[in-house]
Image (tube, rainbow, N blue to C red):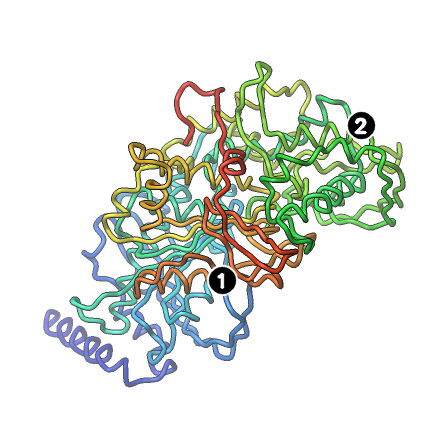
Amino acid sequence: MASYLTLRRALTAAASISAVSATSLSDVCSSTYAQAALPASSFYPGITIDSSSTTAALVSNSSVSSEWYPTATIEYCNVTFAYSHNGLTNDVVHVSYLVPAPENFQNRYVSTGGGGLAINSGSQYSPSGIIVGAVSGITDGGFGNFDTQWDAVFLAANDTINWQATYMFGYQAHHELAVLGKEFARNFYNVSSDTKVYSYYQGCSEGGREGWSQIQRFGDQFDGLAIGAPAFRYGQQQVNHLIGNVVEQTLNYFPSSCELEKIMNLTIAACDPMDGLTDGVVSRSDLCKLNFDINSTIGEAYSCAATTSSGSSGFGGLASGGSIKRRQDDGSTSAIPAQNGTVTAEGAAVASAYLDGFHNSKGERVYISYQPGAQMADAATTYDSTTNTWGLDISGLGGEWVARFLELQDASTLANLDNVTYDTIETWMKLGMNRYADSLQTTYPDLTDFQTSGGKVIHIHGEQDNSIPTGSSVHYYESVREVMYGNATYNESTAALDDFYRLFLVPGGAHCSSNTYQSSGGWPATTLQTVIDWVENSVAPDTLNNSGTVIDSLCRYPLRPLWSGNGTSFDCVYDQTSIDTWNYTFDAYKTPLY
């Protein structure tokens, strides 16, 4: 009798699913229907899906907008369920899939990534899947719920790493999310086994690193990816947030927020016309590096009105997650008085050392910094109203990385940077690189499996990113080119890479978004749609659509934008001297730093 009932239920569920194309979203948005669409118990060896955990909630007339997708009003069914890994105790992973109406489903699945220390970005990116007719998924990584970040579960106790959580954050959770999500989408819409369900990914910052973690390990998992500003070289990237602090401490000068902002604005003004068009955007930060002398700012007057700032500094900017603020901000407010003065030689020296990139005491390059014209967020200082002075403001993301993930203490930041030198920073970078080489570093350059599977990836990065250096993305692109096509000429190798991997730099773009200081630069809002067109229709993008008021298309690297005829004509040009400014020799390492 039990086997007969089981078969009857299965046939009833199958019949229900077969009718999905003729039903409305409200008809199928139920936990019962969603349960019937869950992957079979044997589908993914090593995990067990808890079908009783399934929930379904209908969402209608939801207005969504983002710089990553067109403004839209959408409806979807939010399906969640939980699963566990066999053999692990107290292990529960939650996944959430936004399911479009049956008539809107285009045989697509989309995973979206996180930011900062979060493995998902909630609703920041997931609506883009609904907009393109896809089931759209996020994961909580097994951290407890969708709002819990990795740092909350990283330590089993002081000095003891929770390696399961670390590997889930590093790559495993997103692999499981995508594999389960694609099968769930196929089942939910009763797509036959011989019909293609395309699988896509979108994410920026930490979400960008998560996307590359999948390409590098699971070459056939995604057909296409739209990736922004990935946090490559995690060991270096996170400690790099402390470089501005150590530069200021070493030079014993702590510039005010107004002085730093003046240096940035003068840099933008001087470098803006170097691309052939004065439009408030530094489109050629490489030419800026070649031709702009930051000492020319010395003696220039600055003036800023009094402000009330949240947290500590008034020039802080974003951490490595786009929407996640500097993690030392505690919600408090402080008054910053009106500032008047002139740019000092000491202030220019701090800015110069900060933008030059990190070298150890031997002068060897350890890591890179931001492009000139970027907001100097990691060099932010804090105002002491008691002494009327500016002082050290330890980067929250960098401070927590060292305290929690390197020193393995349950601490949200470092108490101080006493006795921390450039060589200390180098030691921290190498420790993180080696400890998390197989989970977080995410720099494997041989993408042969992805290429041969037919995958396509569009990689974008704001040229004035103030949290993850733009050169970080260029260096990875060059690493892939050299490893995969090292025997070819430069032009031959970039042409070969163009077959599946294209990099676009966004003039004036900040971290994963447009830049308030260079607002005309815009941001590409339909990158996922471009990836889909490339994958499904073989339309490879020579340029990338952009929302900028002047810059409406982006050049594919290594080509660079240039205007001529007093700004009347735009071209994407090859400029070897400028390209060379993006290439670095990391001589502090005995093995290649990809």
Closer to the camera, 478 or 16? 478
Q: Does residue 526 lie above or below 317 as drawn?
A: below
Q: Tell me where residue 403 sits by quadrant.
A: top right
Q: Is residue 147 left or right of residue 258?
A: left
Q: Is residue 114 visible?
A: no
Circle 1 Cα neighbour tier, 10 Å, few/some/many (<14 / 14–19 / ≥20) = some
The residues bearing labels 2 and 1 have C-alpha atoms spaced at a distance of 41 Å
The residue tagged 1 is 545
Q: Tell me where residue 315 sits by quadrant.
A: top right
For marks 2 and 1, the one nearer the N-term is 2
- Numbered disc 1: secondary structure: strand
Q: Does residue 433 lie above or below 17 as drawn?
A: above
Closer to the camera, 23 or 287? 287
Q: Is residue 193 left or right of residue 237?
A: left
The C terminus appears in which quarter of the rendering? top left
Q: Is residue 301 visible?
A: yes
Q: Does residue 434 lie above or below 280 as drawn?
A: above
Residue type, label 2: Ala
- Numbered disc 2: secondary structure: helix
Please provide percent x and percent y for residue 525: 51, 63
Please provide percent x and percent y for residue 28: 33, 79
Residue under the image location 57 percent in, 32 percent down:
240
The residue tagged 2 is 345
Please provide percent x and percent y for residue 24: 35, 84
Count of numbered marks: 2
Q: Does residue 450 lie above or below 420 as drawn?
A: below
The N terminus appears in which quarter of the rendering? bottom left
Query: What residue occupies the far top of the structure in this picture?
Result: 362
Q: Is residue 176 left or right of residue 274?
A: left
Residue under the image location 37 percent in, 37 percent down:
490
Residue type, label 1: Asn
Please provide percent x and percent y for residue 400: 58, 35
